[in-house]
Image (spheres, rainbow, N blue to C red):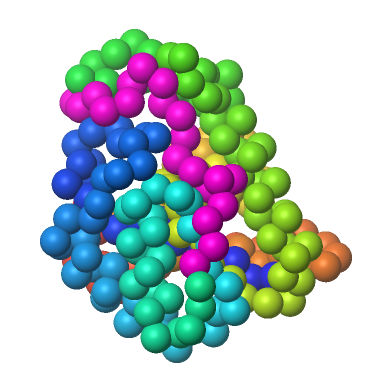
Amino acid sequence: MRVHLIRHSLTPETGKRLSSLDPDISLSPQGVEIANELAGFLSGVELTAIYTSPHQRCRETAAAIAKGRGIRLRTDKAFVEADYGKWLGRPLKSLYRLKAWQQLHASASRFRFPEGETLQEVQTRAVAGVEALSAKHANEPIAVSSHGDVIKVIVAYYLGVPLDLSNRLEPMPASVSVVDIPPVGPARVPVFNAVPDARRWR
């Protein structure tokens, strides 16, 4: 199976706050524009199924990609955003000053978001979701619209990168990363962080 991991496009909060489990945040006008650019970028890529996190921002990004393909979006909770607990909705600038934020980046494998998940728990459920899709879709190319931290830990798993080093991976908004999972042998990551327009990098 080839899975295209797509980080949702820009929202009004991208880069400003931890949106986390808020399901109703939509794409910004610029985010809609970029999602449509991404759809054009992927127009020549065959997809037999498109899965999405249940969050609105991911569903809107996936809908842009699905348009004109005759593919019905399928929601999968395995790819929902990380539960940041008490950090939900907090401005990133305020989090950068916390000692806990430094602990997260120093030892991500042992850090639990206050009253939320660990990245290990996020990785366990997300990779299980990918493996379930691999069993279901075998040799088919599919897409999954999800969130930055979720994609980061999935890619880290298939690259064999320890969680403590996973913050070196940074999927950009409206980016595509590709994981090939063969029936036998190790997975490959032939593409990471491809974007329709490099000038959009934030």
Q: Residue at x 46, y 29 (%)?
A: 83
- Whether residue 131 sits left or right of residue 116 in the image: it is right
Residue 132 placement (x, y as % from top left): 73, 55
Query: Is residue 76 inside the magenta stretch?
Result: yes
- Whether residue 192 is visible, yes or no, is no
Q: Residue at x 76, y 71 (%)?
A: 138
**Vertical position of residue 129 compared to residue 88: above or below:** below
Residue 56 placement (x, y as % from top left): 34, 52
Residue 199 appears in which quarter of the rendering?
A: bottom left
Residue 42 placement (x, y as % from top left): 41, 79
Q: Residue at x 41, y 21 (%)?
A: 85
- Whether residue 133 sits left or right of residue 51 in the image: it is right
- Whether residue 63 is visible, yes or no, is yes
Q: How many marks?
A: 0
Q: Residue at x 49, y 58 (%)?
A: 52
Residue 105 placement (x, y as % from top left): 43, 26
Query: Is residue 169 inside the magenta stretch?
Result: no
**Vertical position of residue 198 compared to residue 71: above or below:** above
Q: Which residues are magenta?
A: 73-93
User: Residue placed farthest to the left in the image?
Assistant: 29
User: Residue placed farthest to the top in the image?
Assistant: 99
Front-lying residue, 107 or 40: 40
Please identify the quadrant where the N terminus is shown: bottom right
Front-lying residue, 171 or 29: 29
**Vertical position of residue 65 compared to residue 25: above or below:** below
Residue 33 appears in which quarter of the rendering?
A: bottom left
Residue 61 appears in which quarter of the rendering?
A: bottom left
